[in-house]
């Protein structure tokens, strides 16, 4: 059997899968998935799709509903009809007007770990303290003599 390198698996709208999916080729899901998916290539979550689980993919385009975290090695596209409830992480992110997204996003084009924040110096970490009576100089603000 001669397989093309651009073979795409399509999970139809009337199909419901419970369990994990692992694949190396492109996949399009138009049905329901109750479980995690790991895909080494491109994923399309169709407008009629409903996924409850985490997705780890190369790239993904979401038009349907995902209730779980999405991690992409390259790109995440959230199309107008997308509804995502979970955290997303990718090198590149595209979000169209009308998307529903509840969660945290991490976009890092270089793929390197983010730099750690420097701790605040003690001078900037302390709240403002008004001067005591002894510290006030006579003459008010302009120091009249």
Image: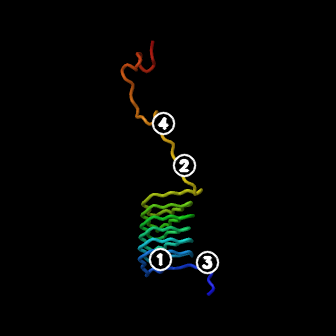
Q: Which mark is residue 6?
A: 3
**Relative to 139, 116 lies left or right:** right
Alpha-carbon span between mark 1 and mark 3: 19 Å
Number of residues whose C-alpha sits closer than 10 Å to that of mark 2, classed few (under 14), some (14–19) or many (20 or more): few
Identify which residue, 48 or 8, lies in the foreground. Answer: 8
Mark sitting on residue 115: 2
98 is higher (above) or lower (below) than 16: above
Spatial separation of the CA atoms under disc 2 and disc 4: 18 Å
Mark 1–mark 4 CB contact (< 8 Å): no
What secondary structure is found at the residue carrying circle 1?
Answer: loop
Sequence-wise first label, 1 or 4: 1
SS for callout 4: loop
Q: Earlier in the sequence, mark 2 or mark 4?
A: 2
Q: Please provide percent x and percent y for residue 101.
A: 44, 62
Q: Residue at x 38, y 27 (%)?
A: 130
Looking at the figure, which quarter contains the C terminus?
A: top left
| Residue under the point 62% across and 78% down | 5
Q: What mark, if any, has residue 121 been given in the picture?
A: 4
Alpha-carbon distance for marks 4 and 3?
A: 55 Å
Above/below status of 124 relative to 115:
above
Q: Quadrant of residue 66?
A: bottom left
Q: Quadrant of the N terminus?
A: bottom right
Single out the residue that lies furthest toward the bottom.
Answer: 1
Q: Using the numbered discs, state the Cα–Cα distance from disc 2 to disc 1 in whole angstroms.
A: 39 Å
Do the CB atoms of the residues marked 2 and 4 lie less than 8 Å apart? Answer: no
The numbered dot on residue 30 is 1
């Amino acid at each position: 059997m001669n397989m093309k390198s651009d073979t795409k698996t399509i999970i139809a709208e009337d199909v419901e899968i419970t369990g994990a999916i692992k694949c190396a080729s492109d996949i399009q899901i138009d049905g329901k998935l109750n479980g995690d998916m790991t895909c080494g290539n491109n994923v399309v979550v169709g407008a009629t799709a409903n996924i409850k689980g985490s997705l780890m993919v190369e790239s993904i385009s979401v038009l349907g509903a995902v209730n779980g975290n999405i991690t992409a090695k390259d790109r995440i596209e959230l199309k107008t009809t997308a509804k995502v409830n979970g955290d997303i992480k990718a090198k590149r992110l595209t979000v169209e007007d009308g998307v529903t997204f509840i969660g945290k996003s991490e976009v890092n084009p270089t793929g390197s770990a983010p730099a750690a924040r420097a701790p605040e110096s003690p001078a900037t970490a302390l709240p403002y303290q008004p001067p005591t009576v002894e510290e006030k100089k006579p003459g008010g603000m302009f120091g009249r003599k």
